[in-house]
Amino acid sequence: MNDDDRTREALFRHAILGEVLSRDLRWGELRHLLADLSGRTFEDHRGRQRRVAHKTLEEWLYRYRHGGFEALKPIARSDRGNSRTLTPEIEQLIVDLKREDPGRSCPLIVRELELAGRICRDQIDVSTVQRLLRRRGLSGPRLELDRPARYRWQASMCGELWQGDALHGPVLVNPASGRRQHAIIFGLIDDRSRIVPYLEAGFGETGHRFLTVLYNAVARRGIPRALLLDNHASFTGYDLRVLCATLNIRLIFCRPGDGPGKGKIERWWRTLREALLDRIDARQVTTLDELNARLWTYVEGEYHNNGHSSLSGQTPLQVWEAGAGDIRWVSDPSWLEAAFHAHIERKARNDSTILWRGVSYEVPPYLRGRTVRLRYSLLEPGLVSVLDGSAEIPLRPVNTIANAHRSRDIAPPATPDPKPSTGLNAPNLILDSFLRPQAPDSKKDPDPDGGDHE
């Protein structure tokens, strides 16, 4: 029992003795009252039906008369916190085994001790080892012996930090595949105000879907100064890192397996499940549009307008509106649209194609063999263009069947400049040199004056 349980048990005992304690009893009357109480059935604080023996009631009464209410509390065991079956040496060995290898399970520890001859077979129960490790703070399948301190915190202003995550929603039929699968809900929450900038249900937990959610969130609620995400592949892609660098958004990632690190959005998911997702009628919600309509009805109609305990009773919308001056709003939608494009260089093949993310695109024939600069949309993966100077040429995927019937004629080349004729030809010169070898002296330059010099 903990202290609360001991207090509740004392209250239970006091309630039973209430009639005895509140009356001035005459000689012999106490015995009859205790006998009457011992024949009754009482319900304790845990809902259990209990009957109390006459001698036990008598003991409670005299303990109360000598020690008051505190004396009615059950007496804690003198060896509380110590195992009756484990010696101090075995206890320390179990702790050392767990610290040496946190992945050791309790059954494995018991088996190792038996094989090593440190204990007899069936001498120690697995539950005994589990209680010991729990008491020492060493329980759990993913034990962290050196966990850093965790503090309650929040951002200092609205828009300073958004937390993002994905949640597995109800099972719906995916029209693309015709199969039933979980809808994935991507969402963001502002750390300061707890407002939800945007969330959306869809099929697939991909980086492209999160970028779409982020674009809509920025368009509605401004540009955050930082994003707190986990290490899932949908949050660690190249496109997101380039976009955040362009928008001056700091990317922060939680440690792997550290769900409480982004506790606010985890708590929001719990609220969403309890209030909405667990109560959706599968007969009425069969498409993503129907699911998203209910999500936004709850967010805008209920959640944003309900008082929040962590906001001193204020609603998320009230806190957001009060801090609107600190938000980096988007003043030019065209600038935001351009920011959700990226550039990369690729080399065009000799068949006038470029391979980009598993898809071959056709480029103008004059660009083959050259390294070109591509511009692609982060929101529409199929929108790819090539930049040639100041011109932007949209590209389309290669249609190999249609290309089999395309004409290969090209415009005739411009008339080249006439080639100069030098009269020199290496094979002829080699032949002449072989047939008419020159004398060694003839290799010397002749005297231009035809005479000797003294």
Image (cartoon, grey):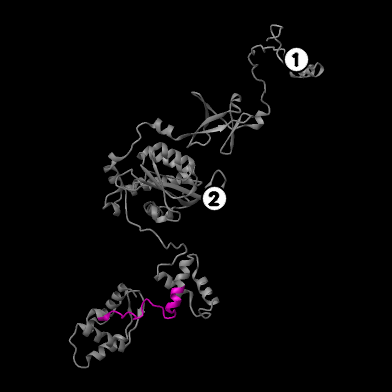
What's under tag 2, amino acid-wise?
A: Arg
Image: magenta residue range = 71-93
Amino acid marked by disc 1: Ser
Image quadrant containing the N terminus: bottom left
Quadrant (top left, top right, bottom left, bottom right) of the C terminus: top right
Any magenta on residue 156? no
**Relative horizontal placement of residue 322, taking residue 354 as reference (left or right):** left
Could you classify mark 1 by the number of other residues whose Cα lies within 10 Å: few (under 14), some (14-19), or many (20 or more)?
few
288 versus 400 height, above or below: below
Asked if residue 286 shows in the view, the reply is: no
Give the total number of marks visible in the rendering: 2
Q: Residue at x 23, y 81 (%)?
A: 18
| Residue 290 picture location, percent across and down | 45, 45
Report the residue marked by disc 2: 180
Identify the residue shown where x is 22% and y is 93%: 28
Q: Considering only vertical position in the picture, is 383 above or below 12?
A: above
Residue 442's disc is 1
Name the residue located 25 percent from the left edge and 85 percent from the top edge.
63
